[in-house]
Each structure stands twice: as C-alpha cells, then as structure tokens.
Amino acid sequence: MSYINIAKAGIAAAVICCLVQCSPKPAMTAEPASAAPAAAASPYGYDVKLTFEPDVTAKFKAEGMKVILGNEFYGQANPAAVAAKKGGAGGELEMGQENFTVDAVDQTIHVTGNNLKTDVLADSVDNAANVLINVQPDTTKNPDSVLNCPDTYQGKVAGAQAKLVEIHCYLPPQ
C-alpha cells in the first residue's frame, strides 16, 4: 500500500469520525413501565461534612491516596438480650457498618443507613442505634500514611440526623 493510499484512508477515517460526532444524538426513550421502583430512603440516614487542610488535599492527590469515612452502627443490649447471650463484650450489639472511600477534598457525604441491621434494634436499649463516625487514611497505597481527624462522632443515630456531623482533618506535625 502506498503512502498516498494510507494518507487517503486516514483522511477518510477522520472525516467519518467528525460526521459521527456532529450527527444528532438519538432520541432518549423513557424507562419501561416494568422498571423496578427506586428503593425507599432509610429512616437512619444522615450527612457528614468532611473538610481538609489544603496540604492534606495536595499530598493525597499527588500520591493518589484516598480517605475512608467509617460509620460503625452498634447498640447496647437490653436485659433480655443480655440474658439470651446476645451481643459481645459488655453487651454491645453489632448493627452493621457503612464505609466510603473518597478523595481527600472538602465534601458532604450522605450516609444512607441502609446497612443498619434493623432486626437487631429490638435487642437494644430503647430500640435505638448508635454510630461511631470517623475518618482515616486508606492505607492500601501507603501503609505508613497518617492523618489527624480528631472530630469523630459517637452517639445516637438520631443525634447525627439532628445536627450535621463535621469532621476536619489535617496532617500531623513532622
């Protein structure tokens, strides 16, 4: 094949690509009536606002690292549950967790509460769930990574719903 034929083929391909990109988009069709309805929102959802010092954002972005927003749901076993030997040490009931691996940039994350094991609520004092919310570095890329995020939340899920949980993170002094 001569250089002229190769050049003609390249030009023809470029013209076709341009025509395809410039052509109108196909009409969007509505979802079929048989599509599954959206899942109902959990009554245990809340928002967490994450803020980071600029040096954290720069370092984590440069190193391709992320942070983990951890939400550990738990409860205190009521007397009947303790008698039935439900719960761990001290009568603590594990109720699930909901974790997010995200970029170290200022953002607000909605925790759905969908992972909260509601069937365990009946075994807890006041039928209420607690949550421990914290942020830590994702150490998959750098096991020695450290980050200070002292603004954790530990309390009732209802408290996290009533007031925006805010967690601020910074790098420890060198």
Image (cartoon, rainbow, N blue to C red):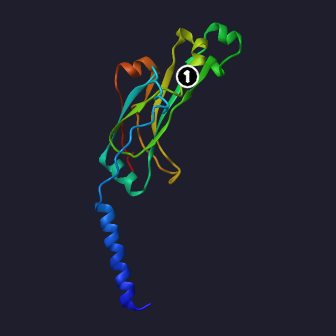
Q: Position of residue 166 (x, y in %)?
A: 35, 30
Residue 81 vertical position relative to residue 13 in the rendered view, above or below: above
Q: Residues within 10 Å of mark 1 (few under 14, many from 20)?
A: many
Residue 26 vertical position relative to residue 133 in the rendered view, above or below: below
Q: Which quadrant, please, contains the N terminus?
A: bottom left
* Drawn side of residue 160 relative to residue 74, left or right: left
Q: How many marks?
A: 1
Give the residue pinned by disc 1.
74
Q: Position of residue 97 (x, y in %)?
A: 54, 30
Residue 149 vertical position relative to residue 91 in the rendered view, above or below: below
Q: Which residue is at 36% across, 74% downward?
A: 13
Residue found at the far bottom of this picture: 2
Q: Which residue is at 61% across, 13% downward?
A: 123
Dot 1 falls on a residue whose secondary structure is strand
Q: Which residue is at 36% across, 48% downward?
A: 56
Amino acid type indicated by mark 1: Tyr
- Quarter of image, res 18: bottom left
Q: Position of residue 14 (x, y in %)?
A: 33, 73
Q: Which residue is at 35% across, 51% downward?
A: 26
Q: Position of residue 30 (x, y in %)?
A: 39, 38
Residue found at the far right of this picture: 84
Q: Nearer the viewer, residue 150 or 37?
A: 37
Q: Nearer the viewer, residue 110 or 168?
A: 110
- Quarter of image, res 116: top right
Residue 142 vertical position relative to residue 53 in the rendered view, above or below: below
Q: Nearer the viewer, residue 111 or 85?
A: 111
